[in-house]
């Protein structure tokens, strides 16, 4: 095996190290790894723009530099996404960089403790242990878990390095927890994972249907776009809980948890019965409608009323609202995606849009709102479920295209997609996967049924965690920790919910020996002995040029985007943008011509029979636990947002549970009392928030607190393998009472 001491020049930015050990001084040499104080191409005192690194809205922020350091930020006024607005996380985006817990040096576990080592030792240890596992148990005994928080260029690098360079067969990312359902639903229905909308559609609709989406706090700037709508739209929220968005809407429908599939089939039936189908559109642009019609005819009003808990009159009101709209848009997030029949539920919304011709026109669409800042980058370019550029691993022509573009041996490309996240976990449990590389995600906090996951991670022979913090729940379990630069300390592009590419820049120096994930991948490639394969992957911008070539001729073609400078000047650019394309007003939606990406150009109606939730309430666990975002000041596992004292002051410091006054009274629970919440899997403490926002028989907990996922039940959507976080049966009891 090639040692780090044998490294050679690969590309202009990669380590030059022919003789002697890799030293800290060499790593920190200004210019070599981009660790100089003044960011490349930026003057010491200037303002530059970059895309926020939290959610998928993709707001642009003006970063103000003084003496080469970022001192403050303001939202970019003329960016077509946020129009001068930002949520609390955006305003506080710089704080996590200087917060406590940053990983500043590589760590290797010795005698049970993580101890500081040189980069050379850490990489040597990682490579030596992963290779030993592969030699003993086969190539697929090592896998990775990535993230939708990294730039597209880094996602592609990790995916290419993992599969083509290191011979791994399986890698997945935390986008599985977030967007797998929407991606699968679109792919099956439209022929490609293609969210069709532009944010301008929020302002052009006359009827906005939000399903399982607490937009007010989860995507506050998108909500602001709705508030700018001059048409006084009907805002319809479908959610079992009276969320902040439901309170602000014109109409709130609260069906029983996970009865939404029956509800949408019932709505489709009513539209058909009332003669409100756009027959011309259905005939010209879709297939499978007759079968769909036959299926939904079973969902009569009495049946749907029974299954959803909504009265027949209320269901008719919902149908009236949809029928009266001329520009109806459907938007969904995790309430749909994170469910056991999420893919078919998303497709039931797609079907409503198709059958009423509400797609491809201003203010319409079946629109999935993404979660993480680069979930879309992960979906297209992480090389996990799809081969680079939304291709199929199973397709020989696709493998050949990628091999030619990347100038690699076609035989190095696997012929099957990766296993999904939950299947990787199962393989660890069964002893088939022994090594895991976790990059910028925190499964020991975020994965469903957390106690089980932690037990599984402890069975690994080698767990490598690459992260900007060394104190995450997952890093604390690691055998090796690789310190990574954060958003703001590296370069690349994100793709937001409306398919818009935007640039992030290096405006700050990473602390200690932390390196951009991009450079860590370069070093791993060299240490592994496969750097020759990545000679063209010399910088994020060089990789962006590769992505352009990989996208050519694909639905996500970005061949017309010259470079980062063009993206910056244009205010981001939505895909597709093939060579020769015109920007126009830079707000573009898909399917305006009624043609889809399927082989025959038609969108498909897809359906199934609704099935009961995998875990239902019973005498012992009588309450259905819903989960979701708690506030706009918290981000997922709070790994970053908890480092901001400003954001921390805006959120409850302790985990809480929303419980209805009826249930609280029945249980003798007082407001703000600490209670015990117990599921079949765990028991945790939380403060009782007695509120009418949840219905009797249901409780709600925000997902951001570390203990929360100890309770959740591991069920998964059949097609997307996305975890169904939104339903598990619990009981609530007073502390001290027998559980
Ligand atoms: S809405 Fe999302 S992208 Fe915009 S500032 Fe907030 S976290 Fe950042």
Image: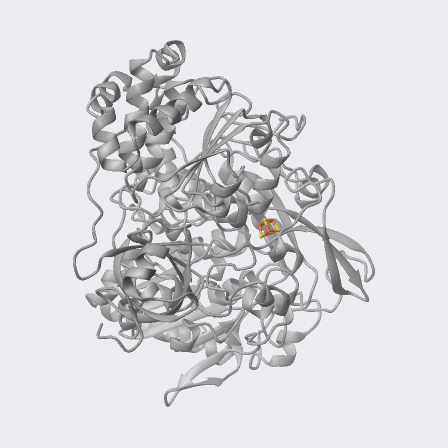
Q: Is residue 558 above or below residue 491?
A: above
Q: How is the image coloured?
A: one colour
Quarter that holds the N terminus:
bottom left
Q: Residue at 26% of width from left, 33% of height from top?
A: 262
The mark tally for this picture is 0
> Residue 368, image x and y in percent?
45, 38
* Position above or below: 545 against 437: above
**Observer-nearest of 189 and 17:** 189
- Residue at 66 percent of width and 38 percent of height: 562
379 vs 202: above or below: below
**Residue 576 lies in what quarter of the image?**
top right
The residue at 28%/52% (across/down) is 697
515 w.r.t. 548: above or below: below
> Residue at horizontal 57%, vertical 41%?
222
**Residue 135 visible, this angle:** yes
Q: Quadrant of residue 571?
A: top right
- Work out which residue is located at the far bottom of the displayed protein and give it: 111
The foreground one among 211 and 44 is 211
Front residue of 672/39: it is 672
Q: Is residue 141 visible?
A: no
- Give how far across and how far down residue 611 sits, in percent: 19, 40
Rendering coords of residue 479 (x, y %): 39, 78
Q: Quadrant of the C terminus?
A: bottom left
Q: Residue furthest left?
A: 619
The answer to which of 47 and 659 lies nearer the viewer is: 659
Where residue 680 appears, as percent x and y from the top left, is 21, 65
């Amino acid at each position: 095996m090639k040692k780090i001491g044998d490294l050679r020049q690969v590309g202009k930015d990669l380590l030059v190290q022919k003789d002697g050990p890799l030293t800290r001084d060499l790593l920190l040499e200004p210019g070599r790894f981009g660790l100089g104080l003044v960011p490349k191409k930026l003057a010491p005192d200037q303002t530059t723009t970059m895309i926020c690194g939290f959610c998928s809205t993709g707001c642009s922020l003006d970063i103000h530099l003084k003496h080469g350091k970022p001192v403050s930020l303001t939202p970019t006024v003329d960016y077509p996404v946020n129009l001068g607005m930002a949520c609390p996380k955006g305003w506080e985006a710089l704080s996590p960089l200087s917060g406590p817990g940053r990983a500043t040096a590589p760590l290797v576990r010795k005698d049970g403790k993580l101890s500081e080592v040189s980069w050379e030792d850490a990489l040597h240890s990682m490579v030596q242990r992963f290779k030993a596992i592969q030699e003993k148990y086969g190539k697929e005994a090592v896998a990775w878990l990535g993230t939708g928080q990294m730039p597209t260029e880094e996602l592609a690098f990790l995916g290419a390095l993992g599969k083509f360079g290191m011979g791994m067969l399986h890698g997945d990312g935390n986008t599985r927890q977030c967007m797998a359902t929407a991606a699968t639903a679109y792919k099956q229905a439209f022929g490609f994972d293609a969210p069709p909308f532009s944010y301008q559609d929020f302002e052009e609709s006359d009827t906005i249907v939000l399903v399982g989406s607490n937009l007010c706090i989860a995507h506050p700037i998108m909500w602001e776009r709705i508030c700018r709508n001059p048409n006084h739209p009907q805002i319809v929220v479908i959610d079992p809980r009276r969320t902040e968005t439901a309170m602000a809407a014109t109409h709130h429908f609260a069906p029983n948890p996970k009865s939404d599939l029956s509800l949408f089939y019932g709505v489709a039936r009513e539209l058909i019965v009332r003669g409100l189908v756009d027959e011309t559109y259905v005939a010209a642009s879709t297939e499978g409608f007759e079968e769909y019609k036959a299926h939904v005819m079973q969902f009569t009003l009495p049946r749907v009323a029974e299954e959803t808990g909504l009265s027949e009159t209320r269901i008719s009101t919902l149908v009236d609202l949809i029928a009266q709209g001329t520009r109806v848009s459907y938007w969904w997030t995790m309430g749909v995606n994170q469910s056991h029949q999420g893919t078919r539920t998303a497709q039931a919304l797609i079907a409503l849009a198709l059958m009423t011709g509400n797609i491809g026109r201003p203010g319409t669409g079946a629109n999935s709102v993404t979660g993480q800042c680069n979930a879309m980058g992960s979906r297209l370019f992480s090389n996990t479920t799809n081969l680079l550029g939304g291709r199929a691993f199973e397709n020989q022509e696709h493998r050949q295209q990628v091999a030619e573009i990347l100038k690699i041996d076609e035989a190095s490309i696997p012929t099957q997609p990766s296993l999904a996240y939950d299947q990787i976990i199962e393989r660890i449990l069964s002893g088939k996967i022994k090594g895991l590389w976790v990059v910028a995600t925190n499964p020991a906090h975020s994965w469903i049924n957390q106690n089980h996951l932690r037990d599984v991670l402890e069975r690994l022979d080698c767990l490598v965690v690459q992260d900007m913090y060394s104190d995450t729940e997952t890093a604390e379990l690691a055998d090796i920790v690789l310190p990574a630069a954060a958003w703001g300390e590296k370069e690349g592009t994100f793709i937001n919910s409306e398919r818009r590419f935007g640039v992030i820049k290096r405006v700050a120096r990473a602390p200690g020996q932390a390196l951009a994930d991009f450079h860590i991948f370069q070093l791993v490639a060299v240490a592994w002995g496969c750097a020759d394969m990545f000679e063209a992957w010399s910088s994020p911008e060089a990789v962006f040029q590769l992505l352009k070539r990989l996208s050519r001729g694909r639905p996500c073609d970005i061949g017309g985007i010259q470079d980062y400078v063009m993206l910056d000047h244009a205010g981001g650019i939505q895909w597709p943008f093939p060579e020769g394309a015109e920007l126009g007003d830079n707000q573009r939606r898909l399917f305006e011509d009624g043609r889809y990406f399927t082989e025959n150009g038609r969108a498909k109606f897809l359906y199934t029979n609704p099935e009961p939730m995998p875990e239902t309430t019973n005498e012992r666990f009588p309450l259905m636990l819903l989960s979701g975002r708690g506030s706009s000041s918290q981000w997922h596992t709070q790994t970053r947002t908890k480092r901001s004292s400003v954001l921390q002051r805006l959120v409850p410091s302790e985990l809480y549970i929303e419980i209805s006054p009826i249930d609280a009274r029945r249980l003798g629970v007082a407001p703000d009392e600490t209670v015990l919440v117990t599921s079949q899997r765990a028991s945790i403490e939380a403060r009782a928030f007695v509120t009418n926002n949840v219905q009797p028989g249901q409780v709600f907990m925000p997902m951001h607190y570390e203990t929360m996922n100890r309770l959740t039940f591991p069920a998964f959507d059949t097609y997307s393998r996305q975890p169904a976080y939104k339903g598990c049966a619990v009981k609530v009891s007073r502390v001290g009472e027998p559980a």
